[in-house]
Amino acid sequence: MKKLLLIINPVAGKSALRSQLIDIVDTFVKADYLVTTVVTQSGEHLTGTVIETAADFDNVVCCGGDGTLNLTINALTKLEKPPVLGYIPGGTTNDFAKSRGISSVPLNAAKQIVDGEVHEIDIGFFGDKAYAYIAAFGVLSDVSYETPRQLKQNIGHAAYVLEGVKALSKNKNYNIKFTVDGEECEGNFIHGMITNTRRVGGFELPIIGDFMLDDGLIDVTLVRKPETADDATKLLNALVTQRPDGYAVIQYRGSKLEYEADTEIPWTLDGEYGGSFAKQTVELKKRHLRMVY
């Protein structure tokens, strides 16, 4: 009999998760798993539980939003031989799950864990902190999460642009030098994101080319501060057309990014606060964890 550690975030955004929990456990038991359930009391409780006990299990399955997944991944990367990861999305955006084809219906996601294949997935590292799909800074970092859901449904990508234009009025910028696989870029930037995903905040990424999720490469998008009306026009055009122009919106693809700024910059990792740093190294470790879906 296989052993499964089921981690549940009781404050995750999706009520369907609560109503399907008994059926989820029953799905695992019928698949010959001995299930141990932990209801998290805090982030520290979650990570501590995984670090201390996960090595005794064949699978660790977390139920919650992208933040719950982030904490679980961070804990698993601390283990010498981490068990296979499973994810039952129960948050409000669930970008990672949708990028991976994991069902948004919790019970169906559990069935995917039972019947699915084990994949080796890339994991990002922002310094010593792991992240699943995105590290971001600047005025646009929260636009996708803050855009009203009804607006997204009604006008799609245009909603992102409208909220982005409003965010630009905040005009917070940072003087930063970036180096991506040896190629340098320097200037005043109002936003940047380092991604390995097709979605952010419930949107398909508006300015990104074709990519593979598990190729060991990160996609870097930088948005330069508009200094003139012409710069602002270029930026708006890049957002509307979803095409980086190489000046207002710059894009790189590589395996490693380093940056240095003249002040500390607050970052979000998988939508959660990840700390403030004046310099940092960001890289993707190819096929670093095993995940079933």
Image (cartoon, helix red, strand yellow):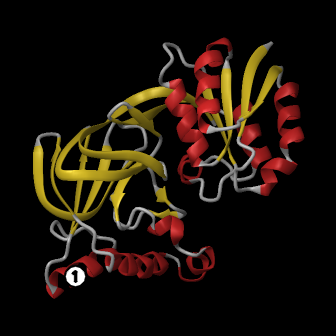
Horizontal side of 258 relative to 150 (left or right) equals left
42 up-or-down from 164: above or below: above
237 up-or-down from 73: above or below: below
Write the residue at 81% across / 23% down.
35
Horizontal side of 73 relative to 122 (left or right) equals right
User: How far from the left and from the top, in percent, is residue 278?
Assistant: 23, 46
User: How far from the left and from the top, in percent, is residue 287?
Assistant: 43, 28
User: How far from the left and from the top, in percent, is residue 172?
Assistant: 28, 69
166 up-or-down from 96: above or below: below
Label count reads 1
Q: Could you say which is closer to the camera, residue 162 or residue 174?
A: 174
| Any part of residue 118 in sight | no
Q: Could you say which is closer to the camera, residue 72 or residue 173?
A: 173
Write the residue at 80% across / 21% down.
33
In the rendered image, which residue does mark 1 sit on?
232
Q: Quadrant of residue 88?
A: top right
Type of amino acid under label 1: Ala
Write the residue at 47% across / 41% down.
132
In the rendered view of the protein, which quadrant contains the N terminus?
top right
Horizontal side of 275 relative to 173 (left or right) equals right
Q: Quick one: SS at disc 1?
A: helix
| Any part of residue 140 in sight | yes
Q: Could you say which is closer to the camera, residue 1 or residue 185?
A: 185
In the rendered view of the protein, which quadrant contains the C terminus?
top right
Write the residue at 57% across / 31% down.
291
232 up-or-down from 73: above or below: below
At label 1, counting other C-alpha atoms closer than 10 Å, the crowd grade (few under 14, some 14-19, many 20 or more) is some
User: How far from the left and from the top, in percent, is residue 241?
Assistant: 32, 77
Q: Quadrant of residue 48?
A: top right
